[in-house]
Amino acid sequence: MTGPVQTPEPPYYAVIFVSEHADDDAGYAVTAARMDELVRGMDGFLGYDHAGEGFGITVSYWRDLAAIARWRAQAEHMMAQRAGKERWYARYSLRVARVERQSFYAKPPAA
Amino acid sequence: MTGPVQTPEPPYYAVIFVSEHADDDAGYAVTAARMDELVRGMDGFLGYDHAGEGFGITVSYWRDLAAIARWRAQAEHMMAQRAGKERWYARYSLRVARVERQSFYAKPPAA
């Protein structure tokens, strides 16, 4: 079982990244795997959900804005952000939002 | 061109819905199309992005919490929510978040 990830009680923050990939995906998979590894080591990182290919949405969850600022300024991540603009993404939107409420549902096992 | 959708200047709200589908998708496509039609007519609805199948993320954008509350309580949507729990979704998470910052990127046309 992967996702939807569980998160602690709000308030906390979500970074909502919606992207349309460009044709050039050279180096993307390796970098994405490295970013996955790096982000899990960041203080204040609470998890992320990702869906889609080509057109994708990644929502990462963070304890506070300071943790988001540190991730945004992480050196390898900054290089990845730059490569994303130059090569991998045709378009994207990026939002920072304060999570105020959450709920989780899981279907009970069939009888 | 579909998404990432454009939204007005923050603050506004995002509803982040992350779901894993169950095996039963009877009626899902028809209901999803009807919800798409209905939501576009809701006062305060600003658009949505969706990615993934099987495991999917939908982020809808709203002017304020009152608009989200009206959509949540819309009669046909309430029936769809119920069918979602009973049939279509194995698991989901639902978050309401206040968008504080946003940015958009589009790659310049190749020279």
Image (tube, coloured by chain):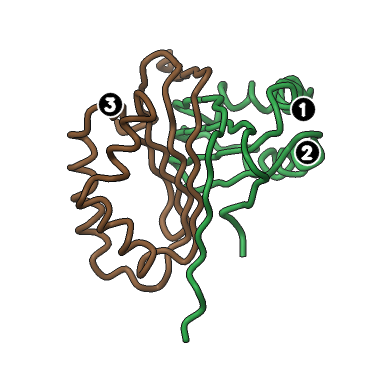
Chain colours: A green, B brown
Q: From the viewer's perspective, is residue B18 above or below residue B87? A: above
The answer for how far apart the CA atoms under marks 3 and 2 are is: 38 Å
SS category of the residue bearing label 1? helix
Chain that bears disc 3: B
The answer for how far apart the CA atoms under marks 1 and 2 are is: 9 Å
Residue at numbered disc 2: A38
Q: Nearer the viewer, residue B98 or B1?
A: B98
> As drawn, is A31 to the left or to the right of B38?
right
Residue at numbered disc 3: B44
Q: Which mark is residue A91?
A: none
Where is residue B87? Give x, y as percent: 35, 69
Compare marks 1 and 2 and give the one earlier in the sequence.
2
Give the crowd class for mark 1: few <14, some 14-19, many >=20 residues within 10 Å: some
Report the label total.
3
Chain that bears disc 1: A
Q: Nearer the viewer, mark 3 or mark 2?
A: 3
Residue at numbered disc 1: A76
Q: Amino acid at mark 3?
A: Gly
Where is residue A89? Give x, y as percent: 50, 29
Q: Amino acid at mark 1?
A: Glu
